Every structure is written in C-alpha cells, then in structure tokens.
Amino acid sequence: MATKGNPGDNRNNKGPVSIFIVVALCGFFYILGLWQRSGFGKGDSIAVEITKHTDCSVLSDLNYETHHDGDAGTPDDSDGQVKEFKPCDDRYIDYTPCHDQARAMTFPRDNMNYRERHCPPQEEKLHCLIAAPRGYATPFPWPKSRDYVPYANAPYKSLTVEKAVQNWIQYEGNVFRFPGGGTQFPQGADAYINELASVIPLDNGMVRTALDTGCGVASWGAYLFKKNVIAMSIAPRDSHEAQVQFALERGVPAIIGVLGTIMLPFPSGSFDMAHCSRCLIPWGANGGLYMKEVDRVLRPGGYWILAGPPINWKHNYHAWQRPEDELKEEQRQIEDTAKLLCWEKKHEKGEIAIWRKALNNDECNEQDTQPTICESANSDDVWYKKMENCITPAKPGTTWKPFPERLNVVPSRITSGSVRGVSTELFEEDNRLWKKHVNAYKRVNKIIDSGRYRNVMDMNAGFGSFAAALDSPKLWVMNVVPTIAEKATLGVVFERGLIGIYHDWCEAFSTYPRTYDLIHANGLFSLYKNECTAEDILLEMDRILRPEGAVIFRDQVGVLKQVKRLAKAMRWNTKMVDHEDGPLISEKVLYAVKRYWVAGDNTTSTD
C-alpha cells in the first residue's frame, strides 16, 4: 500500500529493508538484556524486561530514514566516532553544582543567602560524567522504598546519630530504615497527619498539592501519599547531610532549596497546603516576609500548618529551653502577620497551629492596618527575583475541583484568560495528544507504568499533559516549565493537581545526582538551541539520571541526531524511532538507557 501523501512509495512494504530494521531493533534490546545479565548491571533487569515486552509487530513498520525539511539531505553521522566523556573524579559523586558547599561559604549568611542557588560560571562547569558510588543499587519499588534505602546509594550515617531519638532514620545492615518519625512526630507521621485531617479536608480530594518547608527526610510527604496528596519537600544542603537525597531515594518529591532572599520557583496560588514542622524558619522576622511568600504560593482557601516553637509557648517554653519573652514575641509577630494576610486561625492545640487563607480579597477589607500590595504585573515571574515585603493579590478564578476530577477539567486559569493565547480547545487538544503519545511510548517500553520508574521528570512540561496521561500511584512527575518557555503554564500544572517548578536548563537542577528514574524531554533542545549547548544540558541529564534509568526525547530529527551522537559519548544506549503517525512526520522519538557503571570503573559494558 502506498504511503498517504506519497503515492507509489513502497518503503513501508515488509521487504528486506523492513525486516532488517525489525531484526536490528529487537537485537538491540536483546543485546542490551545480555549486557544487563553480564555482571555490569547491579540494579534490576530493565533491559531484559524491555526485551521481553517489545512488541515487534507494532514496531515492524517503523522507518528510520529522514524524509523532511532541511534535514532531508543531511548525512546521519550520529554513529560516527565521538570522543567519550570521561568520569569525573570520585570526589564529585554527590556533586550539586548550584549548591556546592565550598562556593556557598563565599556568600553572605544573612537571610540564608549562602544556602540559595549559586551556580558555577561556564568556565568552571564540569565536562565529565558523575559516577555512582561503589555498590550502587536500584532503589526498592514503591512503597517499600518509603521505608528502606540501600546504604550504598547515600552512605551517610550522621542523621542516624543526630536524630536517633526522633525516629528519622536508622541504619540496619546494608540499608537505611525510615520508621516514619520526625522531630515533631517521633511516634510516626500517620498519627500526626490524622490529627491534621481532623481540621483540614485531606480525604475528599480538595487538598491535593502541598509544600513542606524544611522537610528533613520528607516523612510527612512520604505518608501523605496515603491520602492521595502530593507534597513538594524543600530543604537546604547543610549540616543535615543528604536529607533531600534521602527523600528522593525514598521516592518522595523534593528539591534543594531554602526560604532566603529570592522567591520560591513556583507561581502564585499554587499549593493547597503549606507546612513547617520545626523548620527553624524565622516566620515573624523581617516584617513577616517569609509568611508573605507562603501566602503568595498558597491558593485562596489554602491551609498553613506551623508545628513546634513558638506555638503554645506558655506550656512548652521549659521543654524547649528557650526564654519565655523571646517565644512570646515570636508568636506575636506570627499572629500579627497572619491577621494582616487575612488568615483565619482554625486550630491550635499542643504544638500545632493551623491557619486558612481567605477565599477572596473581599474578606480582607475590614482591617485596622492596610497591607502593602505588590505592584508587579506578573506574579509568576519569580526566577531569581528578590522577595518583596508585600502581599500578592489572589488570581481571579473559580473554585478548584477535587482530585482526580481536576486532572482533566479545563483549569480556571485558562477559562478566565489568565494564560494569554491559550484557549479551552487548545488545552483539550493538548490533553488528547499526550494520551496518544504516552500510549505510543508504552508500546515501546511496556515497563513505564510497572513500578520500575518512581521518580519521573518532564523537562518541558507545558500544561502537564504528559504527567496527566501517566497518572499512577506507582509514580510521580516533576513538571519543569523552562523559564524561557513562551507561556508560563506552571500555574495550570498545579491547578490540575500536579506539581512542578520553574527552571533554566542552562543551569544545574536543584537536586542530587542519580535522583530520577525516567526523564522526558519534549522539544527541549529546539527550545534551547540559541541559549546554551546541548552538551551542557545532556551532562546535567546524565548527572540526575539513575544508572539504568531511561530517557525519552521528542524533537525534530536533525536535533535528535546531535543528541544521539552526544548520548553515545555518555555511555547511553539509544534507538531512534518514527513518530507514531508515521515516517513522514519530521518529529521523531529517541529512546535512551543509561548504562550501569560506578566509581573506579575504567570501562562499561557496550552494545
């Protein structure tokens, strides 16, 4: 049968060329499976599983020839000789470029400035591959990963001593065990969350997204999954060694971050709930600056939980071993700021207080002191912007739907016209398109939603439709909206009940190495072609991707040829396939798997 739009073209006939392609594709996964079993791969059997499930009847019609645009006559030199990137020195095993301890100490300590992002200049960037530690193992599947982490993956015992009585973490043989405790809830997160649920509606889907500031090892976020609530956990890279790394090893969303001098990388009105459990943040200081930043990212009607000092100081100051007058003043400042923000206190018992943000600005008209209103025309323009000591007006919109209903309902930010140039029809078409794309991905890699991939990242998330199509209790998606994207769509992502962050991919992401299982990059390299090099972005992807982790690239064929060439130099196995609509589409898909290798290895397995 002739290809549509190309009369008489018999390329798609199942002749010798097609058979060769099928054999080559199946052979690729078969050899990858043999490599997996050869002793180089110490993790799970990803390659073997892909080999088992590859549907060659589906893939048999794929045609890898180029058919389009200026790329049509370009020789494919993606398999040419490329100098392989060398491993970095072993001291960089846990390197976090924009949160480097040595660089941090050169910045002022005022307002935690030195714990914020401070990225290396171009000439100081590493152009090598970050190794995994010896003995690195694939994390346990969720929910076992919530409670157990292989010791070799994050070999730091300091918290087992420092937080021993608080039940944060325990060392048992070759694993760390996480009993679910915290400084404020040493008896376990479940009981603590149930107490919160007596005030906050955590069981009906109305509270879906949460922000945990000063999260420790993220046990609060880990146990909130039982309520179908997803928390973004934030903690600095400080003396509490590897707390964010532990969170991600457990399969809990987390980033390295701090409330300091710059705004949080989230749009206004994002989270349904925010939380601080003995997070040591000076909430009442600087005119309530940090409370105003929490107010900015809370949606109207959202909740703020503060547990620990100075709440109920009259009964607790002896146990806290702090001056009574100091605690009294701290709580006064917090109460005054909450009143200024028009937050209603819903609960105070023991060491826990809960406030609720007003549903609309009209509820705040009758106040003795009128607050300063932020003048910025775009409250979502937050990347490296200084925090302002003012109140961000709430965005117009309707009441959010409960989750999971809100996942596919057109968000109010779109129906109200808050996202310029985006219509209801455009959103719905995007949603349909990504369901189609994800179904095509699953036909190639059928273990995508098997539980093998827990921590997933979408590097150019748009409306979050890739994450919505993947939605599963076995995984979560970090939806990244690039700061240079044409449209600021991250607010839409949050309104759907998903989580994400703004980021510039010319810089390193605020995470530890080896923290994501699956990375999706749609149109990313075309977007950044005039901003920074593909090599820089790919090296950062390699840093944050686990050994034997997978990547799915979707882009123009010419762009993917360059990506494939560089990926080969990074010890990745790759395979490019046609768009699911056929070979005449210039957009292609490149699948990649990062090989297993650890510090001290001079070589890795090859194809």
Image: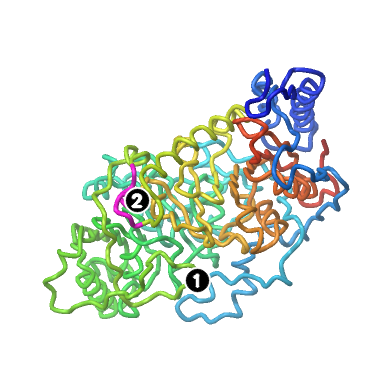
Crowdedness near tag 2: few (<14), some (14–19) or many (≥20) residues, C-alpha within 10 Å: many
State the SS at label 1: loop
Front of the two marks 2 and 1: 2
Q: CA distance from mark 2 to mark 1?
A: 26 Å
* 377 versus 194 height, above or below: below
Can you give x and y, in whole percent of width and height, for residue 339 in the image?
19, 70
What residue is pinned by disc 2?
A: 414
Residue 380 painted magenta: no
**The C terminus sits in image quarter:** top right
Residue 415 painted magenta: yes
**The N terminus sits in image quarter:** top right
User: Range of the magenta residues?
Assistant: 410-418
Q: Is residue 284 left or right of residue 593?
A: left
Residue at the image point whose x is 36% and y is 60% from the top: 277
Residue 184: mark: none
What residue is pinned by disc 1?
A: 384
Q: Amino acid at mark 2?
A: Ile
* 86 versus 125 height, above or below: above
Scheme of colours in the image = rainbow
Can you give x and y, in whole percent of width and height, for residue 381 in the image?
43, 67
The quadrant in which residue 51 appears is top right
Q: Nearer the viewer, residue 482 or 350?
A: 482
Can you give x and y, in whole percent of width and height, for residue 479 in the image?
49, 50
N-terminal of the two: label 2 or label 1?
Answer: 1
